[in-house]
Structure formats: C-alpha cells, structure tokens
Image (tube, grey):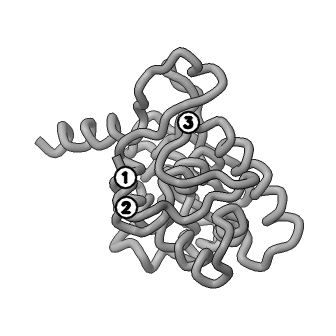
Amino acid sequence: MASYRLLSALALLLSSASCPAAVSSQMIPAGYYQVATLERVPAEALYSLALTESSKKLPHGVRPWPWTLNVAGAGYRYATRQEAYQALLEFMRHHSLKRIDVGIAQVNLGWNGHHFRSAWEAFDPYTNLHVAARILRDCYDKQPGSWIAAAGCYHHPAGGQPARTYQAIVKRHLNRLQPATGVLVSNVVVEPTQGAHP
C-alpha cells in the first residue's frame, strides 16, 4: 500500500499533460500546485526551482528527479529512493552536511536539515518540496517583489554572482513553462491572485 501511494505521488510530480508544443514548453505537474498553494508560492517558481536543482531526462521529457544528491558540487542521480539513501549515508561519513544537498529540490542538510525528521524523510518528494517552498517563501518575504530574486536567495543567500547565475537558469526554465497561476512580467513571477489556482 505504501509503495502504491509513493508511485501515485511520483506520478503527480513527474508527469505533465502532453501538449503539441511539448518541445518548447511544458506544463507543471499537479503535485507542484498542491505544495505551492499550501506554502503560498507560485507553482511556476517552485517547479522552475526543482528543474534547476534536479533535472533528469526521462522518456516523457526533462523532469525534476527526487532521488538526487549533490555532494561538494558533484551531482548524483539514483534509480530508487533506497539507493539514494544508502549513498547519502556513505557521503555523510566523509563530508560536512553543509556540502550535501538532498532530493527533488536539493535542500541543503547542513543549513536546512532541521526541517526533516530524518535523512530518509528528506527524500520524500512532497516533504522536500514543502521545505523548499518554505525556504523560497522566506527569501521572498525578505525582499518582496521578485520570485526570481527569491530563487537566487534559495541557492545562495549571500547573493553575488552565484545567485545571479542561478537566477538566469531558473528564468530559462520559467520561460519554457506554459502560463498558469502566476503572472509573468519581464521574467519576474508576481504573486498569484486569490482563487486563481486550477
């Protein structure tokens, strides 16, 4: 039963409705709307962030991949949650937690690991996205007006060139998305209006 729920959850996060222009644009999977609504962030911003953090080429296109690790700047993608978890345990023996990012939104364990009850939980796609959305929202609240700037803060709170480089990647992903709940204004996602969610 638990594996069926996990497969259903993954389907909501990895799939998107097919569209004729799938090569140049893609729709946001339903799971991102669910998390975004609860955490008060635009689904476009959250999905673009996840694409930036953990993209993997799959048969139905490039999608964020939940069994992803980044350790000291090197990315690793695994076929299953168990494989990713076992690799994480090994990496934790040799690296500072501040050098390890986990899951679909690559939440850093050193700075934000306290949001998870365990390392295993950090790989739960919905839990990982909820944590990422809270961090993104916190960044936005510090400097309202730009979800792109909030994404830069998510990646590198100190700002500077690392944040700007990250913002450019998020913008590229954002520009490939089909319009949805947020409003794009000069590549900046503004707060969605109340009740605008599908």
Q: Secondary structure at mark 3?
A: loop
Verify CB contact (< 8 Å) between mark 3 and mark 2.
no
* Image mark for residue 125: none
Q: What residue appears at the point 66 percent right and 24 percent down from the top-left corner?
A: 24
Q: What residue appears at the point 58 percent right and 53 percent down from the top-left corner?
A: 183
Q: Does residue 120 appear in the picture of this structure?
A: no
Q: CA distance from mark 3 to mark 2?
A: 18 Å
Q: Secondary structure at mark 1?
A: loop
Q: Is residue 108 above or below residue 4?
A: below
Residue 1 locus on image (x, y percent): 11, 41
Q: Amino acid at mark 3?
A: Gln
Residue 56: which quarter of the image? top right
Q: Amino acid at mark 2?
A: Thr
Q: Which residue is mark 1?
A: 197
Q: Which residue is mark 2?
A: 37
> 10 Å neighbourhood of mark 2: few (<14), some, or many (≥20)?
some
Judged left or right of residue 158, residue 127 is left
Q: Amino acid at mark 1?
A: His
Q: Is residue 110 above or below residue 29?
A: below
> 10 Å neighbourhood of mark 1: few (<14), some, or many (≥20)?
some
Q: CA distance from mark 3 to mark 1?
A: 14 Å
Q: Which residue is mark 3?
A: 178
Q: Is residue 194 above or below residue 112?
A: above
Verify CB contact (< 8 Å) between mark 2 and mark 1.
yes
